Image (cartoon, rainbow, N blue to C red):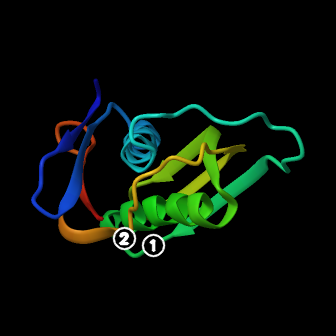
Amino acid sequence: MPWKIIAHTADAGLEVYAETWAELFKLAAEGFYHICLDGDLSSSPFEGFDNSHTISIEAIDLEELAVSWLNELLFLLETRRAIFIPSSLSVSDTRATLLAEGVLAPANQARISVKAATYGGIVINGSPSPFLRVFLDM
């Protein structure tokens, strides 16, 4: 599995390994949803849902980009009860930008309360390949 959950006393941690920056952010979203939805990634039917969605994020560095990405996914989960499923995702590590296009799928109701992705203990680097360690405030 390209991501794993890290045991932590008060929070949940996530480590992600990937070949590209875009894959890293996509896998981080998958691991994040696994934590938020207690492993149940099933969704409700798309009926009555305006499901096309674009996410564009500009940050000062990759740490801020990763935290902002996960917090945007949390915002969509909280406010629209939806999981963002990217059909295309591009990340620039030199400019710390992300552009993702995809759909919103209705999330099931059972979920774990995640307050936010945090900067505490964050590690992100690209050598030898993209890696992210991030903690979620529960």
Q: Which residue is mark 1?
A: 59
Q: Which residue is mark 2?
A: 64
**For residue 116, which quarter of the picture?**
bottom left
116 left or right, relative to 73: left
Q: Is residue 41 visible?
A: yes
Query: For residue 23, which numbered disc appears in the image?
Result: none
Q: From the image, which quarter does the C terminus lie in? A: bottom left
Give the residue furthest to the right.
Answer: 48
Quick check: marks 2 and 1 in contact, CB under 8 Å?
yes
**Which one is nearer the viewer's eye here, 24 or 5?**
5
Q: Is residue 122 visible?
A: no
Q: Residue at x 58, y 31 (%)?
A: 42
**For residue 23, which quarter of the picture?**
top left
**Which one is nearer the viewer's eye here, 71 or 94?**
71
Q: Residue at x 80, y 46 (%)?
A: 51
114 left or right, relative to 78: left
